[in-house]
Every structure is written in structure tokens, then in C-alpha cells.
């Protein structure tokens, strides 16, 4: 009797729990297992493409170096010219939209180097992008060092005593060399990665940004420059282009015109 009691009790304890069984079945589901294997395979391919590919190592290293150099020098030059108390982290020029754009560019690169590795082997395109990044840096840093205190990362809406209209040096050739430089630098960074989608996207987005920032409008740069410097800036804007293709604004006899 006692033996039969323990036997029946043991059988009750060994009876499978439906919830545990269903959970175990979930992890043993062939469809989920195949998905996990596919994800693991993709991750291995990505790591192999990055670690063992000289192309990826060079291109990604150049890209990261370009980003660090651009933003680091912007911040430290601002401190050196304006003084640390007058400079905030906004001088790093890193916004949420910018971070999103860079994440998209890296995602495109990773997808393409796994699925279309040959696309990244067009070294003449990558080298052109590298040259564009260097040219953009040279133009922008030359503009900063030429304008010095007149160069700021935020549009000034009030005239200050030290404000002067800079028309010498690189400003003899373009009115907005800082914008011109970034318009070269941004697409160049994507050409350096051989990212066709982001190259086009960065070109369009940066052009659109500067096309709406430069024109003669309330709260925009050319409006305040004309307010600050009057006819002196009018004459300067007629002689010198903006530096961004198809974005050039001036005041004609009938008002605002563009060409």
C-alpha cells in the first residue's frame, strides 16, 4: 500500500507541465531556429567582411578619422578664437539628425559590403571622396582662421562692436566658404565609403538645408548681414557668389532675385 502510494505520487510529479512543455516547444520551433541561424550567419559575414577585409578596414578608418577630425577641430578652434566661456557643446555641430544620417550611412555600408562587396572596390571613387573631404576641410578651416571672431556656429541676430564684413582671403571668392566646404565634405565622406544611396541623399539634403538657410528671409543669415552692413553687403553679394551651387541671392531693382 505504501509502495503504491509513492508510485502514484512519483507519477504525479513526473507528469509534464503544459506551460513548460509549450515554452520548450517554442525554443525548439524549427522556424525560429532557422531565423536565429540566419541572423547568426549574417552577423558572422558582417564581422568577417569588416575584420578580414582590407577594403573595409581602410574605408571605415578614413571615415571615422574624418568625422573625429572635423568635429574636434571645429570645437577647439571655436574655443581658441572665442574663449571657452563663450563656447558650448553645440560647436561640435552634432545634432540628432546628423547622428541619424551617419548611422544610415554605416548601415548602408555594412549591407553593401556583405551583399555587394565588389561595389566597395572602386578605389578611384573612394579616393575622389577622400580628396573631397580634404578639400572641404581646407576650405572651412581657412574660412574660420580668416574670419576669426566673425565666424560663428550660430547666426547672429544682433550687431556687436567686433562685427566686421570679411571680404578678403577666401571670402574674395565665395561669400559662405563654410557652407561651401560642408557641401563638399558631406557627399565626399559617402563617396569615400562608396555609398551610392547616401552620396545622393547627403548631396540633396545639404543643398536643401543651405538653400533655405542662405536666402534673404527673416531670421536667416543674408537678411541679418544686410541689416548689419547695408549697401556694403549689397555690393559684395552682387560681386561674389554664395559658394553653394544654384543658390545665389541678391537684391535687384525689383526686389529679391536669385540665379
Image (cartoon, helix red, strand yellow):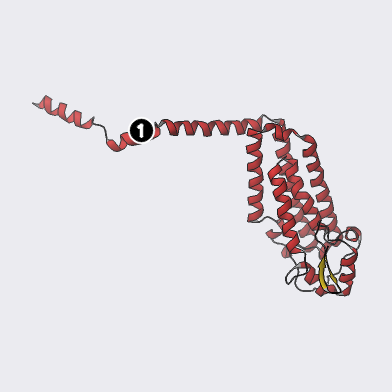
Q: Quadrant of the C terminus?
A: bottom right
Q: Residue furthest top?
A: 3
Q: Residue at x 71, y 56 (%)?
A: 92
* Residue that badge 1 annotates: 25
x, y percent for residue 143: 84, 57
Label 1, secondary structure: give it: helix
- Where residue 133 appears, as percent x and y from the top left, is 79, 46
Q: Residue at 55% across / 30% down in the picture?
A: 41
Query: Which quadrant is home to the N terminus?
Result: top left
Is residue 70 among the parts visible in the rendering?
Answer: yes
Residue closest to the eye, 253 or 47: 253
Q: Residue at 78% across / 43% down in the picture?
A: 129
| Residue 196, quarter of the rendered image | top right
In this image, 55 relative to 236: left or right? left
Counting every numbered tag in the picture gives 1
Does residue 65 appear in the picture of this structure? no
| Closer to us: 252 or 22 | 252
* 134 or 202: nearer the viewer: 202
Amino acid at each position: 500500500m505504501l509502495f503504491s502510494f509513492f508510485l502514484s505520487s512519483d507519477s504525479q510529479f513526473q507528469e509534464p507541465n503544459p506551460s513548460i512543455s509549450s515554452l520548450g516547444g517554442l525554443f525548439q520551433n524549427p522556424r525560429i531556429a532557422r531565423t536565429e541561424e540566419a541572423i547568426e550567419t549574417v552577423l558572422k559575414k558582417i564581422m568577417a567582411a569588416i575584420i578580414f577585409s582590407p577594403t573595409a578596414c581602410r574605408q571605415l578608418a578614413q571615415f571615422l578619422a574624418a568625422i573625429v577630425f572635423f568635429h574636434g577641430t571645429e570645437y577647439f578652434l571655436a574655443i581658441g578664437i572665442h574663449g571657452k566661456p563663450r563656447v558650448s557643446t553645440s560647436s561640435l555641430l552634432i545634432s540628432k539628425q546628423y547622428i541619424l544620417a551617419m548611422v544610415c550611412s554605416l548601415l548602408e555600408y555594412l549591407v553593401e559590403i556583405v551583399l555587394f562587396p565588389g561595389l566597395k572596390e572602386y578605389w578611384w571613387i573612394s579616393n575622389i571622396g577622400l580628396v573631397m573631404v580634404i578639400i572641404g576641410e581646407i576650405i572651412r578651416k581657412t574660412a574660420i582662421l580668416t574670419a576669426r571672431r566673425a565666424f560663428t556656429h550660430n547666426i547672429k541676430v544682433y550687431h556687436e562692436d567686433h562685427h566686421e564684413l570679411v571680404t578678403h582671403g577666401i571670402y574674395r571668392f565665395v561669400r559662405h566658404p563654410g557652407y561651401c566646404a560642408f557641401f563638399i565634405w558631406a557627399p565626399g565622406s559617402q563617396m569615400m565609403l562608396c555609398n551610392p544611396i547616401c552620396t545622393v541623399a547627403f548631396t540633396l539634403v545639404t543643398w536643401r538645408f543651405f538653400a533655405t538657410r542662405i536666402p534673404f528671409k527673416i531670421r536667416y543669415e543674408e537678411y541679418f548681414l544686410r541689416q548689419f552692413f547695408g549697401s556694403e553687403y549689397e555690393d559684395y553679394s552682387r560681386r561674389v557668389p554664395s559658394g553653394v551651387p544654384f543658390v545665389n541671392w541678391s537684391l535687384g531693382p525689383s526686389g529679391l532675385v536669385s540665379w
